[in-house]
Every structure is written in C-alpha cells, then in structure tokens.
C-alpha cells in the first residue's frame, strides 16, 4: 500500500486519506498539504495499466457500484 511504501522508504511522498494519514503522521511523516480547510475533498480511484487491460468489465463494475452508492447517499 502507499502507507507501507512511504514508511518503507520506497516513495518520498504519498496522498493518504484518514486514518492512513494519521498513522503516517504518528510514525513520523510530515504533512506537506492538507484538504482539511477545503470545501471539496479530492479523491481518486486508480488502477494499474495491467488491470485496465485485463479486467475492463470488473473496473466498469467498480465505477457502477461507486456511482450507485453516491446516488443512493445524495
């Protein structure tokens, strides 16, 4: 995970949501920027190029489920 890579020194920085950000800070990571004061929170759903090529139907299902959940909560 990004948290494990950050803590293991494999990456220099990461965008982490809570509670992962809190864990990273507790373990010595420094906050470069935060969305705490922003009205809109940024987010991303990321897939590897391999998964995009090999599992397009599953990825479409993930987006459908996400959009259905957003619509349900709205």
Image (tube, rainbow, N blue to C red):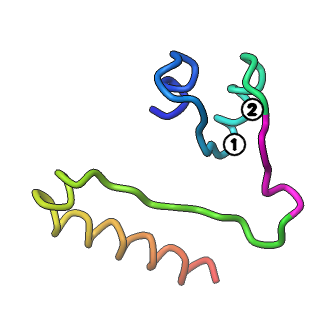
Q: Residue at x 79, y 57 (%)?
A: 35
State the residue position of label 2.
22
Residue 60 in the image: state x and y as whole percent. Answer: 26, 72
Look at the image and tell me in which quarter the N terminus lies. Answer: top left
Q: Residue at x 20, y 61 (%)?
A: 52
Q: Residue furthest left?
A: 54
Residue 18 vertical placement versus 6 (above, below): below
- On the picture, is 28 further left or further right than 16? right
Relative to the observer, which residue lies in front, 23 or 30? 30
Q: Residues within 10 Å of mark 1 (few under 14, many from 20)?
A: few
Q: Tell me where the magenta segment starts and ends, as one range.
A: 31-37
Predominant SS along the magenta part: loop
Do the residues bearing badges 2 and 1 touch, measured as CB atoms within 8 Å?
A: yes
State the residue position of label 1.
18
Look at the image and tell me in which quarter the C terminus lies. Answer: bottom right
Residue 52, labelled with which disc?
none
Q: Secondary structure at mark 1?
A: loop
Q: Residue at x 10, y 57 (%)?
A: 54
């Amino acid at each position: 995970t990004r948290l494990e890579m950050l803590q293991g020194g494999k990456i220099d920085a990461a965008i982490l949501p809570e509670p992962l950000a809190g864990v990273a800070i507790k373990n010595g990571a420094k906050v470069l920027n935060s969305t705490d004061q922003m009205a809109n929170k940024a987010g991303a759903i990321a897939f590897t190029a391999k998964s995009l090529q090999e599992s397009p139907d599953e990825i479409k299902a993930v987006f459908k489920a996400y959009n259905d959940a957003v619509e349900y909560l709205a």
